[in-house]
């Protein structure tokens, strides 16, 4: 903040919930008070603009946004306020910022010395290596070229070294100060399981650990989103779908319900989530493997923004690896770019198959050293490990024999049947029981072989031909494994416990902090009910009014006067003036 207030450029990397917004909001206020004008915040997300502007208004800060939700007259009023200098922070999308009309307005402010700061949020979107690349971000170089002495601050929660370097080059931030916070989110517990009846696994996870909690479930396809949302609803979980194929009004309604209500589970594609500031998301679940660790980290980071315990749960299987690998191979991009994507996928698969601490692996990807956390699945229940090198060689040998015998490729199921010595109709019809590898892997389970195949596909030792019904083929990378030069070590597959259905809790009672006594808990519940009414009246998410932690602190203190409310975190002068008397009334009642 001191660096930016003083006029310096900055690149800021902080985890989700780490306070990135404050890094430009406070300098914006300070620089305007020093007579240096307005701050323009470039954000790709309408939902984030609405939330942040609403929160700033609650804190007594003059803020506005320009986006497609405004009517013509409303947008015109904001532009007039902008040119008068009546706004401290203006939020706008990158597409709007680079239009001739908007640039002409910035020119006018610049000529009068009233442009204080540019804040570029979600800066990883500028990088082709980032997990959410958006071409319109590339045009933001115009800000440096046109307004050279206006400081810029670029912020993101996820960027490995390659993405970071790309951000610096694309936004011309070579001379900027780099501020890299720890990526660790110690309150999040990471669990990754092998996919086996994924819907039932998800149902068991929610039912046993998060019944009645707010959460996000990510799926790869729109169809899957709708199927899972319906399945959860049928089982008594208050779930909503969200994907780009839904009507805009339906999407907005579902997002508003998720933000403003308690205990909603949002089932979504990755179209949902960036910039979602809901603090009490208790879990993020992935039913399909993301493309890379950056995406996984950003998505899991939406859990537990309030610092309370939260879970990041993912199930993945062989088909996930096949699908992701195929999408890369079929991409029209250049080979160098594809290699980068394959490397990122390999790193994520390495995290999924890891037998050591998940957090150590995750942080190491972002070049941060750490100690075992004691809070992930591998730390809490260390998995057994087995050497799959021999099994890998047998699998590759079977693929080789099949190609030799008829020049035809086959899918994973048929290859595993041959290796395990199963005389299926397909095996006998083709005479494959006569292959030298038939039955040499009889001691291996299908689960073990699927794990080996995941590894072989991930390291490029096996290729998947999507145009030939996902058949498997050898590659140049197969030779090293066949020769025993590459070891394949895997975690033992764990058997799934019985499915326990979640309690039916569409209207679950609000959860209360265990630290409060009986009277304190009663005050807390009453304060939450009052906050919900105020939030509805202001058309804002409840957490914008007060976070749960603030309500808990009020309930514990049992204030009887405005003086008693002084010093409670989240209850500043503006909110004390706006809500102090009402809070005392609720507590007294």
Image: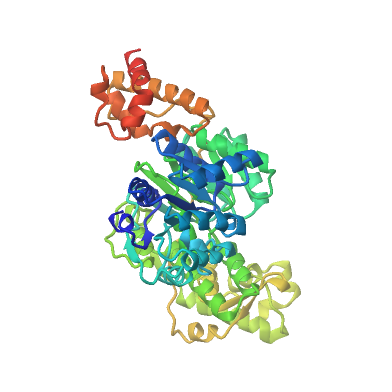
Which residue is situated farthest in the front direction here? Answer: 112
Residue at left 44%, top 67%?
350
224 above or below 175?
above
Q: Nearer the viewer, residue 307 or 370?
A: 307
Q: Nearer the viewer, residue 248 or 358?
A: 248
Residue 209 seen from this side: no
Q: Residue 256, percent across and down?
A: 56, 36
357 above or below 480?
above
Q: Is residue 391 left or right of residue 369?
A: right
Q: Residue 450, percent across and down?
A: 55, 66
Residue at left 67%, top 83%?
403
Q: Is residue 321 left or right of residue 580?
A: right
Q: Quadrant of the C terminus?
A: top left
Identify the image's colour scheme: rainbow, by chain, secondary structure or one colour.
Answer: rainbow
Q: Nearer the viewer, residue 149 or 112?
A: 112
Q: Is residue 332 left or right of residue 551?
A: right
574 above or below 89?
above
């Amino acid at each position: 903040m001191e660096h930016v207030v003083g006029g310096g450029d900055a690149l800021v990397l902080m985890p989700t919930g780490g306070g990135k917004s404050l890094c430009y909001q406070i300098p914006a206020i300070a620089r305007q008070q020093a007579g240096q004008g307005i701050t323009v915040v470039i954000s790709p997300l309408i939902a984030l603009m609405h939330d942040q502007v609403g929160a700033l208004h609650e804190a007594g800060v003059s803020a506005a946004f320009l986006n497609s939700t405004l009517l013509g007259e409303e947008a015109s009023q904001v532009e007039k306020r902008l040119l008068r200098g009546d706004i401290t922070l203006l939020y706008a999308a990158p597409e709007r910022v680079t239009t001739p009309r908007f640039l002409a307005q910035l020119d006018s402010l610049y000529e009068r010395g009233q442009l204080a700061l540019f804040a570029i949020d979600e800066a990883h979107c500028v990088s082709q290596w980032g997990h959410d690349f958006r071409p319109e971000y590339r045009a933001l170089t115009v800000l440096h070229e046109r307004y050279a002495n206006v400081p810029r601050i670029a912020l993101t929660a996820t960027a490995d070294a390659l993405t970071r370097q790309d951000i610096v080059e694309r936004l011309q931030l070579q001379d900027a100060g780099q501020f890299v916070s720890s990526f660790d989110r110690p309150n999040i517990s990471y669990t990754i399981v092998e996919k086996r009846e994924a819907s039932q696994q998800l149902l068991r996870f929610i039912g046993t650990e998060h019944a009645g909690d707010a959460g996000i479930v990510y799926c790869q396809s729109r169809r899957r989103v709708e199927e899972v949302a319906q399945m959860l609803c049928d089982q008594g979980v208050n779930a909503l779908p969200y994907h780009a194929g839904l009507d805009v009004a339906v999407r907005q309604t579902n997002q508003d319900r998720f933000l403003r209500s308690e205990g909603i589970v949002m089932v979504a594609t990755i179209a949902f989530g960036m910039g979602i500031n809901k603090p009490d998301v208790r879990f993020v679940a992935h039913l399909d493997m993301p493309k890379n660790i950056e995406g996984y980290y950003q998505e899991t980071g939406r859990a537990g923004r309030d610092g309370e315990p939260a879970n990041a749960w993912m199930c993945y299987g062989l088909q996930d690896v096949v699908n992701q690998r195929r999408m890369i191979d079929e991409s029209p991009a250049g080979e160098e770019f594809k290699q980068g994507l394959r490397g990122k996928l390999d790193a994520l698969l390495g995290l999924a198959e890891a037998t050591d601490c998940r957090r150590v692996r995750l942080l190491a990807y972002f070049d941060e050293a750490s100690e075992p956390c004691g809070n992930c699945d591998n730390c809490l229940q260390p998995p057994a490990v087995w050497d799959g090198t021999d099994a890998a060689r047998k699998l590759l040998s079977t693929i080789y024999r099949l190609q030799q015998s008829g020049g035809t490729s086959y899918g994973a199921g048929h290859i595993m049947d041959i290796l395990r010595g199963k005389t299926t109709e397909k095996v006998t019809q083709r005479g494959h029981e006569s292959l030298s590898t038939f039955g040499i892997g009889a001691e291996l389970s299908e689960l073990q072989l699927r794990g080996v195949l995941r590894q072989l596909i991930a390291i490029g030792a096996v290729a998947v031909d999507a145009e030939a019904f996902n058949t498997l083929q050898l590659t140049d990378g197969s030779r090293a494994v066949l020769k025993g030069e590459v070891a394949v070590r895997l975690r033992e597959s764990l058997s799934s416990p019985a499915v326990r259905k979640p309690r039916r809790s569409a209207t679950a009672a609000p959860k209360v902090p265990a630290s409060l006594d009986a009277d304190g808990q009663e005050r807390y519940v009453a304060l939450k009910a009052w906050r919900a009414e105020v939030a509805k009246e202001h058309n804002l998410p409840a957490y914008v009014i007060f976070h749960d932690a603030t309500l808990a602190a009020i309930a514990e203190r049992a204030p009887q006067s405005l003086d008693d409310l002084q010093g409670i975190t989240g209850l500043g002068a503006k909110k004390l003036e706006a809500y102090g008397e009402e809070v005392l009334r609720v507590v007294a009642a």
